[in-house]
Image (cartoon, helix red, strand yellow):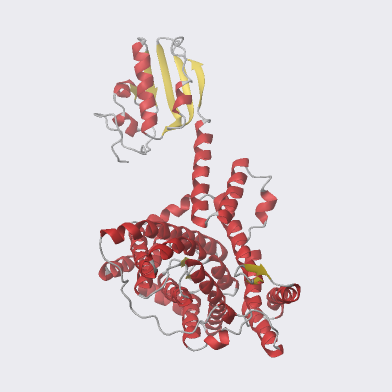
Amino acid sequence: MAKLTLALFANRFDLAGWKEAQAELFTPDRIKIELLAGLTVALALVPEAVAFAFVAGVHPLVGLYAAFIVGLITAVLGGRPGMISGATGALAVVMVSLVARHGVEYLFATVLLMGVLQLLAGALRLGKFIRLVPHPVMLGFVNGLAIVIFMAQLTQFQVDGPDGTKVWMSSGPLLMMIGLVVVTMSIIHWIPKLTTAIPAPLAGIGIVAAIVILFGIDVPRVGDLASIKGGLPSFHIPQVPFDLETLRIIFPYALILAAIGLIESLLTLNLVSELTEERGGASQECLAQGLANTVTGFFGGMGGCAMIGQSMINVKSGGRTRLSGISAALFLLAFILFASGLIEQIPLAALVGVMMMVVIGTFAWQSLTILGRIPLTDALVMILVTIVTVLTDLAIAVVVGVIVSALAYAWNNATRIHAKIETTPDDAKLYQIEGPLFFGSVEGFGELFDLNSDPDVVIVDFLNSRVVDQSALQAIEKLASKYEARGKTLQLRHLSHDCHRLLNRAGQLIVDSDDDPDYGIAVDYSIKTGILSGGH
């Protein structure tokens, strides 16, 4: 496995070119910006990793180790410099039932298998299919994610009630918490207008933390969630039986986690690439995520994927190279090993304020103004993806959005097929087909022809059409059979060379022309069997 992984990465990376490009970027000012951005991200990672560990039902260090290992490996090898990965809520909600039923050791085995599946996805270059996600789905994705991040911050305004359930803070502590959040957000907003020497989120965290500590203000702090003190993650083979029964248990979870992780990571990659106006490598990111989760499974971590909130913090703080992500992971490890006592004193209000600014920056506000100007289908898809993201998870929302968009596209194209009908000088009837001929439009195609009233010679011209799939070929064959049964002559013009080869009964009716199109059919239609057999 190690040799295979190294070979895969060797094919994806130009290491010499990468080192040369990074050397040009690493000026003293750039290094300072990258390190400060990494420190800011690391501070924001702590409560998120702890919270997601609680969601999954595992020890906080399991979440922190995942944030460190996944964050470090993807920062070094990922497809988008500056993107941040770690333990995420989208994965945690899937893990909770596995941990509850089978225990944490099965989780580690699942994370390991999840990584292997992601490596396979990278090796097969499946990441390229993320380009099929339409823009309305992307808008719904970021809007839904902004709402999810906002809702996640609301839990910080709750405390344990007498019966163990979460209740809202009383008026005094609640107002103090809200006030500190507003102060943090104000600092983040105004600091860039005064200086760019320090990232605005880091300034907000530092100033508010200093105020709380110096004046002894009684508000929830990071240490109230859990202690983050620990040692280095150690190599650990999951203590599970390595048999088919274990595979039967963990494979469904691993498959779901791998899919969710890759979808969220690749969408985040696209979003960060748009913000930085630099292209990212989708298949490279799949490989990096796979390697990261495989290693995490061997070192007691809960697995992870890209984190859009922390990635936004990094980008807004000026992080543009791999150094920011690497330093974020190393700072997080330093917190665990040496600075847990100090980090635990940071007020949660400061971190909530940072995340609230992320919410404001993530939500696509322009999408609200264009709702009435874009096609109704696109508007509905955007709203649907936003709602499904909030109610379920990001991966399901994106899949639903892509399916609905694809169905809408297919229906739109299915209704576009029509024909211009003319009579030639020799009294033949000419059907000039316009619009794509595929599985969705074959019924409409068949309804274009008046079989009984047509003259003895009928010409069907596909110059302004395109035969897309096997269903289209079958429809042409069927039409030829119907005209043949009525003793009429059918001529087919401007079909591609593939159609010439693949059509059986209608093949002899095709009229060759110098301007025949030369596109490939999406599938190979077997002349002998008349069934789908793979191919083009």
Relative depth, front residue between 301 and 374: 301
Question: Please, which residue is most extreme toward the front here?
Answer: 163
- Could you tell me which quadrant the N terminus lies in? bottom left
Q: Taking the image as drawn, is residue 252 in sight?
A: yes
Q: Is residue 431 above or below residue 277?
A: above
Residue located 53% across and 54% down the image: 392
Query: Which image quarter: residue 18?
Result: bottom left
Residue at point 55%, 88% (across, down) = 341
Judged from this view, the residue extending furthest toward the left is 528
Q: Is residue 514 visible to us here?
A: no
User: How many numbered marks appear?
Assistant: 0
Residue 115 screen position, x and y as percent: 36, 65
Horizontal side of 82 relative to 163 (left or right) equals: left
Camera-side residue of 4 and 346? 346
Q: How far across and down, in percent of the image, does residue 21 sit? A: 44, 74
Q: Looking at the rendering, in which quadrant would you find the C terminus?
A: top left
Pinpoint residue 24: horizontal percent, then vertical percent.
47, 78
Residue 391 on image: x %, y %:
57, 54
Give me the residue at 40% from left, 77% from top.
19
Q: Is residue 446 above or below residue 327?
A: above
In the figure, 211 relative to 276: above or below? Answer: below
